[in-house]
Amino acid sequence: MTRIISGSAGGRRLVTPPGDATRPTSDRVREALFSMLEARGAVAGARVLDLFAGSGALGLEAASRGAVAVTLVDSAPPAVAAARSNATVVTGPSGQGGVRVDVVRSTALRYLTRPDVGPFDLVLLDPPYPLGEDDLAEHLAALAGHGPVVSGHGLLADGALVVVERSARSPQPRWPAGLVAEPVRRYGETALWTAERAAP
């Protein structure tokens, strides 16, 4: 069972897409991640982007804990349907829960090239573990405004944090210029890599 851990919607259950294509972040890892983020003041009032969102558990945890706007992006129809259903757990059926949650059906890279998105204060990436390191680097480059496919505008606010969840056996992501890497945090089979947008 996946649930919201804390905040205004704490304890409420979330649905997950059928099948094994989606790998929900465990409660233990989510609690550790958000304890770290809240200690840094990175959640309350934040504009959050959740890429490869699956059920939306990461972004909706942020919404429950005080983020003001959350965008959930996934390309799989079952995941998008689950994320839309789960969004009402935080916003209520009328969408008036004090936080704006948008669910977008798109590949992550295509979304990052749109001219009408951002800036974000917190970006959460939980890509499928089989996603190659080159592909991940391309996504991070687009997020930072580098590489051959960019949106031409700032997706990251000053001081924004980017968190990547990977297998503990994966190497450090290839962070592009402008993102300053921090030490990895490992929790069993999961590694959380964090980087902060450097001051201009």
Image: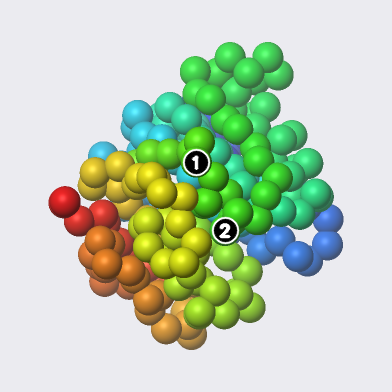
Quarter residue 11 falls in? top right
The image position of residue 193, as x and y in percent, is 37, 67
Circle 2 Cα neighbour tier, 10 Å, few/some/many (<14 / 14–19 / ≥20): some
Instruction: Tell me whether the residue at label 1 lies in contact with that at label 2, contact meaning CB atoms closer than 8 angstroms.
Output: no
Q: Is residue 134 above or below residue 86?
A: below
- Of residue 188 and residue 90, the one placed in the foreground of this image is 90
Residue 121 rendering spot, x and y as whole percentages: 35, 42
As drawn, the label of residue 131 is none
- Tell me the kind of residue under disc 2: Leu
Question: Percent position (x, y) of residue 95?
Answer: 63, 18
- Quarter of the rendering containing residue 97: top right
Residue at horizontal 54 percent and vertical 74 percent from the top: 135
> 162 or 65: nearer the eye?
162
93 displayed left or right of 26: right
- The answer to whether any part of residue 51 appears in the image is yes
Please tell me whether mark 2 sits on a helix, a strand or a loop.
helix
Residue 61 appears in view: no
The residue at the point 76 percent across, 54 percent down is: 76
Query: Foreground mark, 1 or 2?
Result: 1
Identify which residue, 6 or 164, lies in the foreground: 164
**Does label 1 or label 2 sit earlier along the sequence?**
2
| Residue 53 pos. (x, y %) | 61, 51
Amino acid bearing label 1: Pro
In the image, taking residue 88 as reference, residue 132 lies left or right, namely left
Which of the two residues, 45 or 37, is positioned nearer the viewer here? 45
Judging by the rendered image, the residue that carries numbered circle 1 is 115
CA gap between label 1 and label 2 equals 13 Å
- Residue at horizontal 83 percent and vertical 55 percent from the top: 18
Density class for disc 1 (Cα within 10 Å; few <14, some 14-19, many ≥20) is few
Q: Secondary structure at mark 1?
A: loop
Location of mark 2 (residue): 109
